[in-house]
Image (cartoon, grey):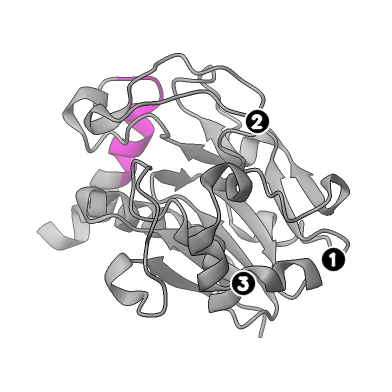
């Protein structure tokens, strides 16, 4: 059976975002999905040595091929997203000639501060790594062992510098639509609340926030009955 493997960034500061995102996938999926939360306390073989970053999975995302034992495919996604379509659509875009496939954003941020007062700086290939379709068995990805990731700077990892450019496949922008940074879009397949999930008070009334709030309300409906 074809099972979609999804590794999702998890940070206790916004745990609700993880659950809302997973629910948004489950209720629309036409294939079985397995979810692996990148919770820091579960990664016993990886010790975070980087001192920067606004969330707990900023570097552990690159463990995805390792966690999958360098076999098959997996989707990595930041937890601050919602899915508007059947995730099978993304799964079917797997290209065996590529090591990864990402949305190749090219933008300047509208805000230099994001959620919880974190700095939000511009840099090359910003947000490319927030949604990755991983070819876990690609030979170039075998370098991504815990010790290697611990030793590399963020610029190296988030720019996929262990790969040649032609090994980085491109996905349509609808698969990682940046709320606030991009105009409102009804065609967005994955909405990414990169500046701040509407679970944070200051982002409850921002561009496309109503879509996240509606999904949140659907998620908790069953709990309240």
Q: In this view, does 128 lie above or below 151?
A: above
Which is nearer the N-term, disc 3 or disc 1?
A: 3
Label 2, label 1: how many angstroms apart (C-alpha)? 22 Å
Residue, disc 1:
96
Mark in front: 3 vs 1:
3
Regarding residue 181, the answer to whether it shows in the image is: yes
> How many numbered markers are drawn?
3
| Residue range of the region highlighted in magenta in the rendering | 206-215
Location of residue 44 in the rendering, given as x and y in whole percent from the top left corner: 35, 79
Cα separation between marks 3 and 2: 23 Å
Residue at point 65%, 43% (across, down)? 159
Q: Residue 105 carries which label?
A: 2
- Frontmost residue, 22 versus 180: 180
The residue that appears at 38% across and 34% down in the rendered structure is 211
Q: Position of residue 172 (x, y in %)?
A: 72, 38
Question: What crowding class fits label 2: few (fewer than 14 Cα within 10 Å), some (14-19), or many (20 or more)?
Answer: some
Query: Going by the image, does 200 lie left or right of 77?
Result: left
How packed mark 1 is, by other alpha carbons closer than 10 Å (few <14, some 14-19, many 20 or more), is: some
Q: Where is residue 1 in the image (x, y as percent from the top left)?
A: 66, 86
Secondary structure mostly seen in magenta is helix
Q: Residue 65 carries which label?
A: 3
* Residue 18 location (% of width, % of height): 33, 55
Query: SS of the residue at dot 1?
Result: loop
* Secondary-structure class at tag 2: loop
Give the class, few, some or many, for how many residues have Cα within 10 Å of label 3's Cα (few <14, many ≥20): many
Please tell me whether residue 207 belongs to the stretch shown in magenta: yes
Q: In this view, which residue lies farthest toward the front?
A: 151
Q: Considering only vertical position in the picture, is 40 above or below 32? A: above
> Dots 2 and 1: beta carbons under 8 Å?
no
């Amino acid at each position: 059976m074809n099972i979609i493997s999804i590794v999702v960034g998890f940070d206790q500061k916004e745990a609700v975002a993880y659950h809302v995102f997973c629910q948004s996938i489950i209720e629309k999926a036409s294939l079985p999905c397995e979810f692996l939360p990148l919770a820091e306390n579960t990664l016993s073989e990886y010790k975070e040595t980087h001192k920067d970053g606004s969330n707990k999975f900023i570097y552990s995302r690159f463990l995805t091929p390792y966690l999958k034992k360098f076999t098959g495919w997996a989707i990595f996604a930041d937890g601050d997203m919602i899915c508007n379509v059947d995730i099978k659509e993304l799964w079917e875009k797997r290209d065996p000639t590529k090591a990864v496939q990402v949305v190749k954003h090219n933008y300047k941020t509208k805000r230099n501060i994001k959620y919880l007062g974190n700095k939000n700086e511009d840099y090359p290939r910003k947000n490319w790594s927030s949604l990755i379709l991983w070819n876990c068995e690609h030979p170039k990805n075998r370098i991504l062992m815990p010790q290697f990731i611990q030793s590399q700077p963020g610029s190296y990892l988030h720019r996929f510098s262990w790969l040649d450019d032609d090994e980085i496949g491109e996905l349509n922008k609808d698969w990682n639509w940046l709320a606030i940074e991009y105009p409102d879009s009804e065609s967005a397949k994955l909405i990414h609340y990169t500046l701040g999930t509407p679970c944070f008070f200051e982002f409850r009334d921002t561009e496309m926030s109503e879509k996240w709030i509606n999904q949140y309300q659907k998620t908790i409906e069953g709990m309240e009955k």
